[in-house]
Image (spheres, rainbow, N blue to C red):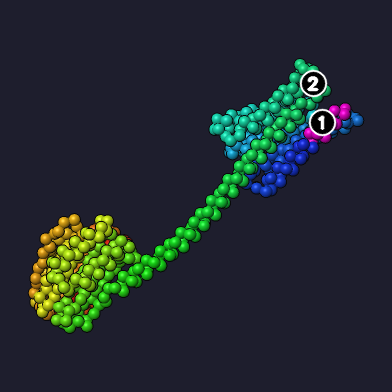
C-alpha cells in the first residue's frame, strides 16, 4: 500500500464514521426522521467498504488480499441497499415492490462474489447498475413532484456518477490515473456524504421549525381556548343573572286575587327570553294583564321586555288598552332600537267584563263553561314600534263564572315536531278543552306537557308563555 492509499483509507473511513455518528445522534433526537437512520447505517457500511477495499492493497500475501476482497464484496450490497432506502425516505416515497427484487439480486450476487471474488464480480456490477437506474428514477420522480431540495441530493449523486465513471475508464484502460488516484468512487461517495448531510440538516431544521411553530400555535390555541372558556363562563354567569333578574320581575301563579285563579308561565328558548307578562290590580278590583313577545331572542329582546315593563308600570292602569298600545308604539319607535318590535296583548277585566286590545299577538281563547266550547277572539294589529300610527282596535267580551281565558305567545302554536309539522291552533283547542277540569296551574302544566310531547327531541325554537285566568 502506498502512502496515498493509506491516507485515502484513513481520510474516507474517518469522514464516513464521523458523519455516521452525527446522523445517528440526529435520528435518536428525532426518531420520526428515518432518513437519518438509513443514512447513518449507509455511512458505517461505506466506512467498512472503504477500509476493506484499501486494506486489500496492504496484504502481504495473496491469501490475505483475497480475504479482504471477500470482506469488501460482503459489505458492498448492503451499502447500496441502505443508500437506496435513504433516498426513498428523503423524498417520502413508498418503498416499491421492485426494490425487493433489487435486494435479492444484490444479496445473491454479493454472496456469490464472496465465494468467488473475481469470477462473480461482474454480476455484482450488474446489480449495482440496477441500483443506479433505480436512483435515477427516484430523482426524476422527486424533481417532477418538485420535492424540496431535491437538487442537493442530485448534485451529490452526480459526483458519485462522475467518479464511478472514472473508475470504469481506468478498469477499461481508457484513462490514465490522475494524481495517482486509483479508486475514484470514494471521492464520489464523499460528494454524496457532504450533500446528503446538507440536505438532512436543512430537512432537520425545517422539521424542527415546523414542530416548534406547531407547538407555538398549539400553545396559542390552548391559551385562546382557555380565554374563550373563561369568557363563555363569564357571559353564561351574566346571562343567568339577567335571566334571574328578568324572572324576578315577572309575577308567579296566584289565586290571591278575589274572583280569579291565575297562572303565569314562561319557558325561554335561550338564557334571556323575549316574552313578557305582567298584571296590575287597581283599588276597585280592575285586573289589567299584559302578555307580549319581542322580536328575536337574547339580550336585545330582553332589553325590549324591560322597556315595555316600564311602560306598563307607568301607563298600564291609567290608559284604556287601545290608548296604551298607541303610546307604547310611539315610545318604542322614538327609542330607535334598530328593528326591534314588540307584539303585545292588553286585557282588562272588571265585573266579569273583559276588554281585549292586541298588537300582533295570537288569538285569545276563552273556554265557555255553559257550552263546553272554545271561543276564539282574533284581533289584527301591527307589533309595537312600527313607523306609523296604527289604528289599534279592541273587543269587549262578557265572562261568566267558570269561564277560562287563555293568553299565549306564538312560541306555542308555532312549535314544530320532528316531522316539521306545526302544532297550530286547532290542536291547541283540543288540548285546552281536554285540560279545563284542573286548576289554573294544572291546566298550564298540561299545556306544557303537550308541547314537550309534540316537539319530542327537537329543540325549542321560541319562547313559550301562558297567562291563564279562571273566573271563579
Magenta stretch containing residue 10, yes or no? yes
Q: What residue appears at the point 22 percent right and 72 percent down from the top-left corner?
A: 313
Q: Nearer the viewer, residue 115 or 296?
A: 296
Question: Alpha-carbon distance for marks 1 and 2?
Answer: 14 Å
Q: Which mark is residue 178?
A: 2
Query: What's drawn in magenta, residue-wise?
Result: 2-13
Apparent side of residue 403 relative to residue 267 in the rendered image (left or right): left
Q: Secondary structure at mark 1?
A: helix
Q: Which residue was labeled with disc 1?
A: 8
Mark sitting on residue 452? none
Is 47 or 348 nearer to us in this picture? 348
- The image position of residue 193, as x and y in percent, is 71, 34
Above-or-below relation of 283 to 172? below
Label 2 sits on a secondary structure element that is loop
Whichever of labels 1 and 2 marks the residue nearer the N terminus, that label is: 1
The crowding category of the residue bearing disc 1, from other C-alpha atoms within 10 Å (few below 14, some 14 to 19, many at least 20), is some
Amino acid at each position: 500500500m502506498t502512502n496515498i492509499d493509506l491516507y485515502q483509507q484513513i481520510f474516507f473511513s474517518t469522514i464516513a464514521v464521523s458523519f455516521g455518528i452525527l446522523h445517528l445522534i440526529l435520528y435518536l433526537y428525532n426518531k420520526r426522521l428515518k432518513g437519518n437512520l438509513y443514512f447513518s447505517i449507509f455511512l458505517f457500511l461505506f466506512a467498512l467498504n472503504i477500509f476493506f477495499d484499501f486494506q486489500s492493497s496492504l496484504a502481504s500475501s495473496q491469501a490475505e488480499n483475497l480475504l479482504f476482497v471477500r470482506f469488501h464484496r460482503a459489505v458492498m450490497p448492503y451499502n447500496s441497499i441502505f443508500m437506496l432506502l435513504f433516498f426513498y425516505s428523503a423524498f417520502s416515497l413508498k418503498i416499491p415492490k421492485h426494490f425487493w427484487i433489487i435486494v435479492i439480486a444484490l444479496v445473491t450476487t454479493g454472496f456469490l462474489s464472496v465465494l468467488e471474488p473475481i469470477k462473480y464480480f461482474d454480476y455484482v456490477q450488474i446489480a449495482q447498475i440496477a441500483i443506479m437506474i433505480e436512483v435515477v428514477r427516484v430523482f426524476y420522480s422527486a424533481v417532477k413532484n418538485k420535492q424540496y431540495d431535491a437538487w442537493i441530493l442530485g448534485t451529490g449523486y452526480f459526483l458519485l456518477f462522475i467518479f464511478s465513471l472514472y473508475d470504469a475508464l481506468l478498469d477499461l484502460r481508457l484513462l490514465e490515473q490522475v494524481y495517482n488516484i486509483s479508486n475514484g468512487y470514494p471521492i464520489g461517495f464523499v460528494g454524496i456524504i457532504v450533500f446528503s448531510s446538507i440536505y438532512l440538516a436543512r430537512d432537520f431544521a425545517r422539521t424542527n421549525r415546523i414542530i416548534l411553530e406547531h407547538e407555538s400555535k398549539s400553545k396559542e390555541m390552548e391559551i385562546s381556548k382557555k380565554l374563550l372558556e373563561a369568557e363563555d363562563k363569564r357571559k353564561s354567569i351574566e346571562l343567568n343573572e339577567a335571566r334571574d333578574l328578568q324572572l324576578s320581575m315577572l309575577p308567579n301563579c296566584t289565586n290571591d286575587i278575589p274572583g280569579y285563579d291565575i297562572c303565569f308561565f314562561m319557558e325561554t328558548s335561550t338564557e334571556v327570553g323575549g316574552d313578557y307578562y305582567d298584571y296590575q290590580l287597581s283599588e276597585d278590583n280592575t285586573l289589567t294583564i299584559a302578555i307580549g313577545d319581542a322580536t328575536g331572542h337574547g339580550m336585545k329582546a330582553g332589553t325590549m321586555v324591560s322597556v315595555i315593563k316600564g311602560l306598563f308600570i307607568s301607563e298600564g292602569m291609567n290608559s284604556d288598552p287601545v290608548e296604551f298600545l298607541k303610546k307604547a308604539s310611539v315610545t318604542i319607535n322614538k327609542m330607535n332600537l334598530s328593528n326591534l318590535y314588540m307584539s303585545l296583548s292588553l286585557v282588562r277585566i272588571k265585573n266579569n267584563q273583559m276588554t281585549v286590545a292586541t298588537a300582533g299577538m295570537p288569538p285569545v281563547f276563552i273556554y265557555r263553561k255553559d257550552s263546553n266550547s272554545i271561543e276564539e277572539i282574533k284581533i289584527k294589529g301591527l307589533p309595537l314600534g312600527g313607523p306609523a300610527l296604527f289604528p289599534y282596535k279592541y273587543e269587549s267580551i262578557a265572562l261568566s263564572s267558570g269561564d277560562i281565558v287563555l293568553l299565549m305567545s306564538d312560541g306555542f302554536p308555532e312549535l314544530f315536531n320532528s316531522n316539521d309539522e306545526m302544532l297550530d291552533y286547532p290542536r291547541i283547542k283540543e288540548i285546552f278543552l281536554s285540560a279545563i277540569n284542573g286548576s289554573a296551574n294544572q291546566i298550564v302544566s298540561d299545556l306544557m306537557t303537550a308541547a314537550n310531547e309534540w316537539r319530542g327531541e327537537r329543540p325549542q325554537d321560541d319562547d313559550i308563555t301562558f297567562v291563564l285566568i279562571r273566573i271563579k
